[in-house]
């Protein structure tokens, strides 16, 4: 059996002793297999951290991933096929609780459960996000060291930009050339420059390589060369169920390792490993707070009723959840020669699949969200009927709405077919800077039970979130009616039938649509753009944050978090690139901060 990635993690761990897990650092050191770093979750952050930390031959790294290997998963390789992974074994397949503002619907939240995490099934939009987002992290949230200028060197070092001759507008000097992550298909203009991040219309750069394949964080950072490293160990199907602490021999609770199981069967065997230096939690914005809570780090009044012993009464765990909501797509019947929804049919997509297999080209290299406009609704008077939103953008310069165009019908993650059949074009607004704040909390202390996900969409008292969304919808309507687009559309817009639940307006009366009707559509059709963040947020104050500026969990030793959950505030765009850059930066900080070969015990 190859060393990495392995299907059976038992070789890298110690089966649970009959007497239970060790309770002191010294006992863990004596009785368990040990690694310098144990990383939980091989997603956007975990892959980068494992790759960078194991560059040092004298440092051993164990990466534990609840999902399986990504290597032979075709739908993860072919860019346009990622929707086929939804609800599969590679998806955590989460749902929110009923959302009061959205007709009490439960919204589906896909999340990758596979090497590469959500980067193995996401839409591959490569976006640095607004410069002002990170500068706000510093100026408003006190996160010195995580501003835009601090992260730019890491964006550059991560990316390997491939110019596309058919789209010449990207200034190659603004993109990294030596990194691992392949970010081809340039955009016009480049939204990933200091000025470009603040808005404009762009043909998205994507993380798709020259072979037309997804470049996930797993394919980029866990390459065959990296996997050959004798000091890097990867355990797939290793669901971490608890972080273990020494609360006996140290003044501050000290992380000594983790416990995991390869099956949710309660009778399945449990394994334990010792982390000599640190455990780094990279399970994502839902699973990271869940695991912290189950391990006893969280609000005492939530944990005590569930019988979970308190390690640290940390009030911010699972709080400050922010997401990006898409209210509803605006859809038009378009000329089928420009659209791609015919590819949803396995038979009709066969020639395209053959072309992709032979040449790595063709329509299957599309990422769905090809084009986007980043706008500030405060600067656009999209409609007189909508009340004007207030400015809650980062630094009062960033965008608050993104309009994404897709050459197919994109209702509910593309899972709901358009009643009118194929040949659709969608524009979807996304609210980038919501005020509404939600929570992740425990349903039970069973780590295999899904946590309670409550984003509380549109719950802000000022109702500004709804105003921004209405302005975004008005923007989409204006664009879809623009003269430049008409040549791509069928003469009669879809859903001309007033009885249709979905889109009862024709081109002649489209401008008469009321805000009330738009809100009605939104209640029925709103879905997530899959960007939850902030549930273990970074900050200097332990009462309002979970990790400090070095991403160390407040109140305990030897435990860090790095993933979307540490964002102090929601960013105005797509989070994969920021998470990757932050993980890269953290790996550098860890390397610089440690004396090689010194176990944590030496510092206790
Ligand atoms: C459908 C979809 C489309 C998206 N499109 C884009 C896009 O186009 N551009 C963009 O920038 N972003 C996009 N995103 C968002 C982006 O993919 C995520 O924000 C990012 O991957 C989050 O990184 P992370 O490291 O926080 O978590 P993840 O990448 O989700 O990784 C977490 C990993 O931890 C593992 N894990 C969790 N709990 C445990 C446990 N207890 N034990 C062991 N392992 C565990 C998970 O299985 C997973 O592999 C999209 C997301 C989705 C779902």
Image (cartoon, rainbow, N blue to C red):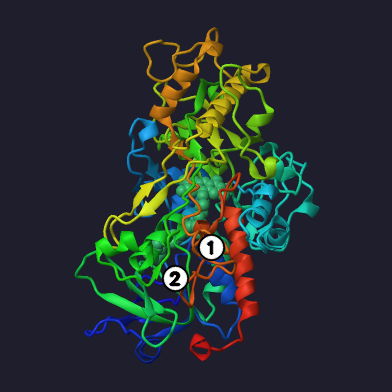
**Which residue lies under the disc numbered 1?**
45
x%, y% of residue 244? 37, 77
Q: Secondary structure at mark 1?
A: helix
x%, y% of residue 308? 29, 67
Q: Nearer the viewer, residue 536 or 338?
A: 536
Query: Does residue 398 show up?
Result: yes
Which numbered circle lies on residue 297?
A: none
Identity of the residue drawn at 54% across and 63% down: 541
**Which residue lies under the disc numbered 2?**
5
User: CB of mark 1 within 8 Å of CB of mark 2?
Assistant: no
Q: CA distance from mark 1 to mark 2?
A: 17 Å
Mark closest to the chain's N terminus, 1 or 2: 2
Identity of the residue drawn at 37% across and 81% down: 247
User: Quick one: label 1, few (<14), some, or many (20+) residues within 10 Å?
Assistant: many
User: Quick one: label 2, few (<14), some, or many (20+) residues within 10 Å?
Assistant: many
Q: Quadrant of residue 402?
A: top right
Where 8 falls versus 45 (above or below)? Answer: below
Residue ranking furthest to the top:
508
Query: Does residue 492 show up?
Result: no
> Does the residue tagged 1 have its C-beta within 8 Å of any atom of ligand 1?
yes
User: In the picture provided, is 505 more to the left or to the right than 383?
Assistant: left
x%, y% of residue 138? 66, 57
Quadrant location of the N terminus?
A: bottom left
x%, y% of residue 232? 50, 77
């Amino acid at each position: 059996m190859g060393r990495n990635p392995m299907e059976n993690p038992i070789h890298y761990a110690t089966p649970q002793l009959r007497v239970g897990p060790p309770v002191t650092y010294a006992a863990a050191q004596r009785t368990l297999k040990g690694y310098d770093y144990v990383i939980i979750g091989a997603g956007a952050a975990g892959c980068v951290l494992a790759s960078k930390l194991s560059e040092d031959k004298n440092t051993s790294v164990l990466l534990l991933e609840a999902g399986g290997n990504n290597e032979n998963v075709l739908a993860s390789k072919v860019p346009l096929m990622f929707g086929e992974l939804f609800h599969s074994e590679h998806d955590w397949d989460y749902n929110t609780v009923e959302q009061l503002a959205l007709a009490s619907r439960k919204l589906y939240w896909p999340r990758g459960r596979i090497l590469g995490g959500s980067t193995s099934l996401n839409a591959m939009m490569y976006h640095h996000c607004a410069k002002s987002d990170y500068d706000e992290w510093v100026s408003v949230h006190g996160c010195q060291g995580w501003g835009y200028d601090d992260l730019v060197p890491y964006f550059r070092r991560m990316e390997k930009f491939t110019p596309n001759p058919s789209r010449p507008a990207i200034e190659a000097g603004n993109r990294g050339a030596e990194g691992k992550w392949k970010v081809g298909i340039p955009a016009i203009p480049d939204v990933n420059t200091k000025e470009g991040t603040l808005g404009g219309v762009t043909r998205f750069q994507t993380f798709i390589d020259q072979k037309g394949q997804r470049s996930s964080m797993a394919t980029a950072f866990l390459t065959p060369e990296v996997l050959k490293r004798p000091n890097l160990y990867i355990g797939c199907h290793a669901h971490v169920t608890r972080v273990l602490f020494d609360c006996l021999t140290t003044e501050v609770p000290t992380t000594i390792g983790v416990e995991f199981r390869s099956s949710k069967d309660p009778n399945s065997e449990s394994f334990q490993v010792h982390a000599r230096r640190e455990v780094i939690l990279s399970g994502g914005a839902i699973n990271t707070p869940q695991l912290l809570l189950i391990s006893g780090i969280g609000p005492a009044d939530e944990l005590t009723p569930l019988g979970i012993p308190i390690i640290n009464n940390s009030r911010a765990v699972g709080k400050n959840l922010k997401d990006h909501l898409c209210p509803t797509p605006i859809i038009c019947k378009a000329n089928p020669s420009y659209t791609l929804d015919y590819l949803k049919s396995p038979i009709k997509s066969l020639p395209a699949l053959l072309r992709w297999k032979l040449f790595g080209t063709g329509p299957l290299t599309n990422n769905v969200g090809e084009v986007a406009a980043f706008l500030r609704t405060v600067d656009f008077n999209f409609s007189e009927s909508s009340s004007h939103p207030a400015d809650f953008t980062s630094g009062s310069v960033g965008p608050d709405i993104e309009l994404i165009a897709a050459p197919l019908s994109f209702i509910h993650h593309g899972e709901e077919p358009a009643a009118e059949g194929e040949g659709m074009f969608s524009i979807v607004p996304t609210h980038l800077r919501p005020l509404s704040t939600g929570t992740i909390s425990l349903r039970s202390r069973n780590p295999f039970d899904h946590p309670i996900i409550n984003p509380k969409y549109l719950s802000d008292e000022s109702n500004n979130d709804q105003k921004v969304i209405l302005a975004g919808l008005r923007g989409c309507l204006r664009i879809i009616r623009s003269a430049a687009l008409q040549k791509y559309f069928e003469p009669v817009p879809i859903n001309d039938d007033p009885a249709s639940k979905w889109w009862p307006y024709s081109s002649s009366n489209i401008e008469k649509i009321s805000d009330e009707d738009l809100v009605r559509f939104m209640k029925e059709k709103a879905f997530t753009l899959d960007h939850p963040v902030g549930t273990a947020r970074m900050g200097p104050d332990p009462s309002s944050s979970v990790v400090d500026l070095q991403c160390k969990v407040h109140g305990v030793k030897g435990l860090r978090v790095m993933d979307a959950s540490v964002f102090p505030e929601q960013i105005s765009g797509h989070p994969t690139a920021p998470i990757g850059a932050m993980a890269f930066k953290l790996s550098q900080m860890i390397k610089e901060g440690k004396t090689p070969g010194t176990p944590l015990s030496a510092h206790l």
